[in-house]
């Protein structure tokens, strides 16, 4: 019987430890164990045979570290080692007299590298590395793939995808969690189950790290959410240091077996052992559990989306999806996407997550840009700083495919609809990469005007999805919000359709809310009313603006009224925050033509010598003070107030530049420190953002273009970020290429932007090589550029040696050099106009 | 917490006795709290017998030619490979902070650096006590990248220690540690008592000869 069927019908037994046994056989610390399948075939074969003789069904190959990275320097390829590994297990199975069904599991462990963005291994390189191993193992005759001891969900996804793409073998996958129940890179059993069930593995579970007793509570948690057979493979207790320095595990076979019997009784169907376990342990487990009838695997029907670190279940309390990362009607976001300004996109994401969004919609559809590349970039950027799951939103199937592939977790996907072509394009993606897909109730004939019409399309979508193996739990129906100003019954039709679909099909529902009020006055009020009605009609998730206090108030109030908020705890907490108490009073956008300017806050000048002065000077003085003090919000407000009737350039020259110079010189003299310098820079930047409008097209708009990057090989970017902030405060336009940037990309950006200055940062001696290569390429391809370098290990002499034009020991030095390159000495000249600043 | 704040200030360029203003002091407190919430600090160690070949330490299949390491391990028959990390979430926290404010990011970086040093010190203290019971004196930490101990020792050290599996610590192709707020070190084990300078000492910088270092604390 194939293993996919067996695992549904009976308990299966994996083998025990490999590493522990190899160490006992003489493997030295740091020695590659995997090549022993080739160099010590008898030892490895005997080891597998001992597990088969003990009664195990599945012996895993000696290929835990069988990747090109870990095998480097051994003289063997991953393919050679995988084939040999499979060969040894097959030989052992043939030699063993055991009559139980026997299987060869191709064992796959971590790559030993951290994937981007935390480390430097690109996701697709990880997939390719695993592909090489698994393809060879499958060709050599493995019966299944066992992915184990994974502590990073992204690497886990890479391994499962590689298995899917290289063979048709069943996939078993286990992760290792700490005593806190979490993976090393974040995440827990909820995120792991979401990811692995989305990727349709055949069994999933836990191995290593913990002894069997400590795995029991985690098994209970797993059993509550998983609809897939569960694997439990614990260590033989916790290790202690042995005489020789290595780890020793003390749990005896009979003790181990006693707890594993309980593990089986509580629902695990595949039992095995990890570090410290031996054939004796597995023999004891098999004896202790062979009479047990395994608990059935039940479909839990949970609708879950996840990121690497957080899972969100849809179907209980309503879920809020932030709508702000969508360029439609948002000129600033359009500009950011066109200019590749991911910082702005990420700021939008962070603000929405902080406002309470459970999921963030990400849409990068904009004419004239490469949507797939931009969507992936935005998604990866958001996932590098937030654990909020994402809704990947695109009408471009290629963009969706690329983003779904590289997404770390199980994404929400927006969207499919009732058109045959749409379903043909989107469902295979959901089937392959996993996802919870938004299904719009429209088809080739358009959007039905009747509730029955929309119900019928929802039914068609669910039926067609089932043909791809996509369950109803992974579909969320959108009965479509239509503008009420275009049809008086539109809102009612949507609400009634929502209720009917929910009742008849027992499926989750979603709406984008804001569309209902298009063209009407008091849109926030209309949206809030519609939203509350939709929640009562059974809405499971809503796409809203979480930064809008009226919407968030409605979220909390309706949740409390609809019994989704026990003891109204969420509501009380929300309104207990002083920031939220009176928020709606400022929420509605003022009518056109009555735009209010924020009143200038009254702050006392901190600088001595602030004499009674004419109103103009006083305002500038306050602005100067705000910048020197590093008060970002006040600086922006004061700049706005100072703008009234005054020339923006005059404010820049009279207040911004003197204040910045004051702080900059203080830093250079050692009387002010980095945090103060940066806080002032941010305050100046916030003031300049207001004043920019007034100097558009003039000389004061930009001090010049600078391209900056942390060089190839280097993952530390704080130095680069500091220089960027300082340059921007001095009104340089900075193109920030990020970290670990290849030389070619720097040269390309230098030519694309036409900059005269490139700034490069590197932290370590080992990455200064990357800097040297980048400078050499710039001299060849962009000879118009000067290069300024900085970083912990650099010195002036070292900088000269690698061909840099200037060495900046700190951020102010980089600013001064940029001013020199662009010949902007105006700042210093202006300073003499303002003698009011104190001596440092 | 006050000690941690002082250390963070040192990384931000403050000299002994220079005090931060109220705003920065509050920022330091908030950053320390955020790090404490995000961090999942962990360490790993492995005791090995010292094997030498012509003055070079044999580490797995590799010869480590480092006079400074040799001096560090003088008189020790055994040593520990040591690695500690605050975990990946702290890197994400720092990245997220930087998207909103680079001033906060700089403070967060300094706080995280102070935090991992403090954690490594406490782990080191734990090991000192544990090995004292077994009759060993224990040296201070000596890390790849210091003195003439090449940074590319990092990969070998992590591999032998199995640091990726144990605590999720890896090195990039350029031998940088990821997660970034991490420390690796070699610690000597001696059956003889060790002089103050070679032990884990009060002044963190006492054993280092780089007297011109901007961050030197003693």
Image (tube, rainbow, N blue to C red):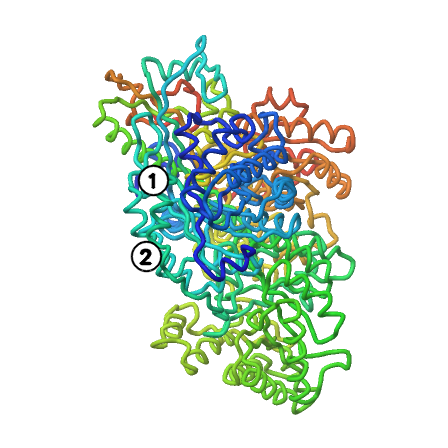
Q: Is residue B202 above or below residue A545?
A: above
Query: Which residue is at the front of the view, A652 or B96?
Result: B96
Is A684 displayed left or right of A180 in the figure? right
Q: Nearer the viewer, mark 2 or mark 1?
A: 2
Q: Is residue A39 above or below residue A108?
A: above
Secondary structure category for the residue under label 1: helix
Q: Is residue A417 above or below residue A771?
A: below
Callout 2: 10 Å neighbours few (<14), some, many (20+)? some
Q: Residue at x 34, y 56 (%)?
A: A216
Do the residues bearing badges 2 and 1 touch, measured as CB atoms within 8 Å? no
Secondary structure category for the residue under label 2: helix
Which chain is home to disc 1?
A: B
Is B130 displayed left or right of A185 in the figure? left
Which chain is home to disc 2?
A: A
- Counting from the top left corner in percent of width and height, residue B45 is at 36, 31
- Counting from the top left corner in percent of width and height, residue A816 is at 61, 34
Q: Residue at x 43, y 51 (%)?
A: A206
**Residue A615 seen by the camera:** no
- Look at mark 1 in the image and give the residue it sits on: B4
- Look at mark 2 in the image and give the residue it sits on: A262
**Are the residues flagged by discs 2 and 1 from a single subunit?**
no
């Amino acid at each position: 019987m194939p293993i996919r069927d067996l695992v549904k019908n009976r308990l299966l037994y994996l083998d025990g430890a490999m590493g522990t046994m190899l160490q006992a056989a003489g493997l030295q610390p740091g020695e590659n164990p995997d090549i022993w399948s080739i160099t010590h075939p008898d030892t490895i074969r005997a080891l597998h045979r001992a597990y088969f003789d003990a009664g195990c069904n599945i012996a895993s190959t000696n290929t835990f570290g069988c990747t090109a990275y870990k095998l480097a320097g051994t003289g063997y390829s991953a393919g050679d080692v995988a084939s040999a590994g499979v060969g040894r297990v097959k030989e052992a199975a043939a030699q063993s007299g055991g009559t139980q069904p026997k299987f060869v599991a191709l064992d796959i462990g971590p790559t030993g590298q951290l994937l981007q963005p935390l480390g430097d291994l690109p996701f697709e390189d990880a997939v390719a590395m695993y592909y090489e191993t698994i393809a060879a193992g499958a060709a050599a005759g493995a019966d299944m793939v066992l992915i184990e001891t994974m502590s990073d969900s992204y690497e886990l996804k890479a391994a499962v995808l590689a298995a899917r793409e290289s063979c048709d073998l069943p996939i078993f996958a286990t992760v290792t969690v700490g005593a806190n129940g979490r993976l090393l890179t974040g995440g827990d059993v909820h995120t792991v189950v979401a990811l692995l069930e989305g990727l349709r593995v055949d069994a999933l579970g836990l191995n290593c790290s913990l002894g069997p007793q400590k795995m029991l509570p985690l098994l209970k948690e797993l059993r509550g959410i998983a609809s897939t057979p569960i694997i439990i493979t614990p260590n033989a207790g916790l290790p202690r240091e042995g005489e020789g320095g290595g780890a020793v595990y003390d749990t005896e076979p009979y003790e181990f077996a006693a707890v594993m019997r309980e593990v089986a009784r509580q629902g695990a169907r595949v039992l095995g052992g990890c570090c410290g376990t031996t054939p004796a342990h597995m023999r004891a487990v098999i004896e202790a559990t062979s009479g047990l009838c395994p608990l059935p695997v039940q479909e839990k029907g949970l609708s879950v989306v996840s990121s690497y670190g957080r899972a969100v279940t849809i179907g209980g309390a309503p879920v809020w999806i932030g709508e702000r990362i969508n360029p439609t009607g948002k000129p600033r976001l359009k500009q950011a996407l066109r200019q590749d300004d991911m910082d702005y996109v990420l700021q939008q994401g962070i603000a929405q997550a902080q406002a309470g969004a459970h999921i963030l919609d990400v849409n990068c559809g904009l004419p004239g840009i490469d949507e797939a590349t931009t969507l992936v970039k935005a998604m990866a950027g958001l996932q590098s700083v937030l654990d909020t799951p994402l809704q990947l939103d695109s009408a471009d199937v290629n963009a969706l495919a690329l983003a779904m592939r590289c997404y770390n977790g199980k994404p929400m996907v927006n969207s499919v609809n009732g058109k045959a072509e749409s379903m043909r394009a989107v469902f295979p993606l959901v089937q392959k990469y996993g996802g919870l897909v938004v299904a719009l109730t429209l088809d080739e004939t358009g959007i039905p005007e009747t509730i029955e019409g929309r119900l019928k399309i929802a039914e068609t979508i669910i039926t067609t999805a089932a043909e791809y193996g996509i369950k109803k739990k992974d579909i969320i129906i959108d009965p479509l919000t239509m503008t009420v100003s275009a049809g008086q019954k539109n809102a009612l039709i949507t609400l009634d359709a929502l209720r009917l679909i929910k009742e008849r099909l027992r499926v989750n529902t979603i709406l984008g809310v804001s569309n209902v009020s298009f063209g009407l006055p008091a849109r926030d009020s209309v949206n809030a009313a519609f939203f509350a009605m939709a929640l009562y009609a059974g809405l499971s998730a809503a796409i809203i603006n979480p930064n809008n206090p009226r919407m968030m108030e409605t979220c909390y109030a309706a949740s409390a009224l609809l019994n989704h908020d026990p003891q109204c705890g969420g509501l009380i907490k929300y309104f207990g925050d002083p920031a939220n108490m009176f928020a709606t009073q400022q929420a509605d956008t003022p009518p056109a033509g009555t735009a209010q300017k924020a009143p200038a806050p009254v702050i006392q000048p901190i600088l001595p010598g602030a004499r009674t002065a004419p109103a103009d000077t006083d305002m500038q003085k306050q602005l100067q003070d705000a910048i020197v003090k590093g008060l970002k919000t006040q600086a922006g407000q004061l700049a706005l107030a100072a703008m009234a009737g005054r020339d923006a350039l005059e404010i820049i020259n009279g207040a911004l530049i003197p204040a910045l110079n004051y702080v900059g010189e203080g830093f250079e003299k050692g009387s002010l420190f980095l945090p103060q310098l940066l806080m002032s820079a941010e305050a100046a930047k916030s003031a300049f953002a207001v004043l920019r409008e007034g100097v558009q097209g003039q000389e004061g708009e930009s001090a010049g273009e600078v391209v900056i990057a942390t060089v190839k090989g280097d993952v530390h970017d704080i130095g680069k970020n500091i220089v960027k902030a300082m340059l921007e405060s001095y009104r340089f336009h900075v193109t920030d290429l990020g970290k670990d940037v290849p030389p070619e990309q720097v040269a390309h950006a230098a030519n694309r932007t036409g900059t005269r200055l490139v700034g490069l940062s590197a932290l370590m001696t080992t990455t200064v090589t990357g800097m040297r290569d980048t400078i050499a390429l710039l001299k060849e391809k962009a000879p118009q550029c000067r290069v300024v370098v900085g970083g912990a290990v650099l010195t002036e002499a070292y900088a000269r040696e690698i061909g840099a034009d200037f060495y900046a020991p700190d951020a102010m030095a980089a600013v001064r050099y940029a001013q020199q390159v662009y010949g902007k000495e105006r700042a210093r000249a202006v300073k003499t106009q303002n003698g009011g600043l104190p001596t440092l | 917490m006050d000690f941690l704040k002082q250390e963070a200030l040192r990384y931000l360029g403050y000299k002994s006795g220079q005090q931060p203003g109220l705003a920065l002091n509050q920022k330091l407190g908030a950053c320390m709290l955020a790090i404490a919430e995000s961090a999942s600090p962990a360490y790993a160690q492995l005791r090995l017998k010292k094997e030498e070949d012509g003055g070079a330490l044999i580490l797995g299949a590799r010869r480590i030619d480092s006079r400074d390491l040799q001096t560090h391990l003088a008189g020790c028959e055994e040593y520990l490979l040591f690695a500690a990390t605050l975990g990946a979430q702290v890197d994400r926290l720092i990245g997220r902070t930087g998207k909103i404010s680079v001033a906060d990011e700089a403070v967060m970086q300094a706080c995280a650096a102070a935090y991992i040093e403090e954690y490594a010190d406490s782990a080191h203290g734990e090991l000192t006590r544990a090995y004292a019971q077994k009759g060993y004196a224990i040296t201070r930490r000596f890390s790849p990248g210091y003195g003439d101990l090449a940074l590319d020792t990092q990969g070998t050290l992590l591999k032998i220690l199995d640091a990726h599996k144990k605590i999720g610590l890896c090195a990039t192709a350029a031998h940088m540690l990821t997660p970034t707020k991490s420390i690796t070190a070699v610690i000597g084990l001696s059956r003889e008592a060790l002089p103050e300078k070679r032990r884990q000492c009060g002044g963190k910088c006492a054993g280092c000869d780089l007297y011109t270092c901007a961050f030197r604390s003693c």
